[in-house]
């Protein structure tokens, strides 16, 4: 990315100016600063966004995988209650917020897009919870998390292959790995056990669909 680097305050101001505070349809308990029709964030071209220092705004959408996983955590709080949790590829922070509302002892949200730090700060504040953020690529790391959550990460082959190997290692030492996925191409099906299935309303402009069947999987 060659655009100018924004400060945390500038990133927060950009998010506030270009999003609305709304509840994702499948997780009405949580409110997030998301792209909406009024702000037309998704109509900006990648070049326009790059000129202001902004990679594609994944953080401005509640992805189907994240909505399914967040729904599962709120409906099954025992999954994370009292546990040390990593929300990998946190985007808006939706999954991290759901884990905290479900009673997680602590949540580390990690995403390589620096805008996600500002999105997480604004969105946790809007929901009265607190999470730590890490802007590094944590794939391959192990900080002893009890539960690792991954909403919608199997859309890219290289990322999916790296995640699969990492999740296998973490599951092998006893961590619980939960994945929310709406049928992305690179999902490693053979290693997954289905826990729940939802019909999740999504943004048509992103998914070319109104609803996505979304499964919460446990990585065994
Ligand atoms: C489709 S979005 C999902 C966001 C969120 N989990 C949700 O479900 O709404 C994918 C996210 O993965 C992040 N990402 C991609 N590669 C990553 C990596 N190596 N480490 C951390 N995050 C990564 C992107 O920046 C983006 O925010």
Image (cartoon, grey):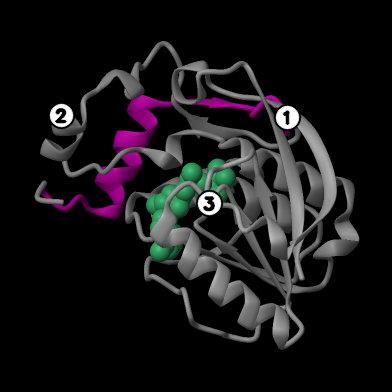
**Pointer 1 residue:** 26
For residue 67, the mark is none
Q: Which residues are magenta?
A: 4-28
Question: What crowding class fits label 1: few (fewer than 14 Cα within 10 Å), some (14-19), or many (20 or more)?
Answer: some
Asked whether the beta carbons under mark 3 and mark 2 sit within 8 Å of each other, the answer is: no
Q: Give the mark count.
A: 3
**Pointer 3 residue:** 186
Secondary structure, mark 3, is loop
52 drawn magenta: no
Residue 178 seen:
no
Q: Which residue appears at 87% of the width and 56% of the height? A: 77
Separation (CA) of disc 1 from disc 2: 31 Å
State the image coordinates of residue 162 (x, y, percent, origin top left).
46, 69
Question: What crowding class fits label 2: few (fewer than 14 Cα within 10 Å), some (14-19), or many (20 or more)?
Answer: few
Q: Earlier in the sequence, mark 3 or mark 2?
A: 2
Secondary structure, mark 1, is loop
Question: What crowding class fits label 3: few (fewer than 14 Cα within 10 Å), some (14-19), or many (20 or more)?
Answer: some
Q: Earlier in the sequence, mark 1 or mark 2?
A: 1
Hey, which residue is sitting farthest front in the picture? Answer: 190
Rendered position, 158 above or below 12: below
Circle 3 or circle 2, nearest the eye: 3
Separation (CA) of disc 3 from disc 1: 24 Å
For residue 48, the mark is 2
Rendered position, 219 above or below 53: below
Q: Please give left or right for residue 179 compared with residue 20 in the image.
A: right
Asked which quadrant contains residue 215, the reply is top right
Q: Which residue appears at 23% of the width and 53% of the height? A: 7
11 drawn magenta: yes
């Amino acid at each position: 990315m060659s655009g100018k680097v924004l400060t945390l305050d500038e990133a927060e101001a950009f998010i506030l100016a270009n999003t609305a505070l709304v509840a994702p349809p499948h997780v009405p308990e949580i409110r997030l600063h998301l792209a909406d029709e009024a702000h037309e964030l998704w109509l900006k071209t990648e070049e326009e966004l790059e000129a202001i220092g902004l990679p594609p705004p994944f953080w401005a959408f509640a992805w189907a995988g994240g909505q399914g996983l967040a729904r599962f955590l709120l409906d099954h709080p025992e999954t994370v209650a009292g546990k040390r949790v990593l929300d990998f590829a946190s985007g808006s922070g939706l999954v991290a917020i759901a884990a905290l509302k479900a009673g997680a002892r602590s949540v580390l949200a990690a995403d390589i897009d620096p805008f996600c730090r500002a999105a997480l700060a604004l969105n946790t504040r809007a929901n009265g919870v607190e999470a730590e953020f890490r802007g590094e690529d944590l794939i391959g790391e192990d900080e002893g998390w009890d539960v690792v959550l991954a909403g919608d990460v199997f859309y890219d082959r290289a990322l999916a292959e790296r995640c699969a190997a990492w999740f296998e290692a973490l599951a092998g030492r006893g961590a619980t790995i939960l994945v929310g996925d709406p049928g992305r191409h690179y999902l490693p099906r053979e290693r997954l056990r289905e826990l729940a299935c939802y019909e999740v309303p999504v943004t048509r402009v992103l998914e070319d669909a109104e609803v996505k069947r979304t499964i919460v999987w446990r990585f065994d």
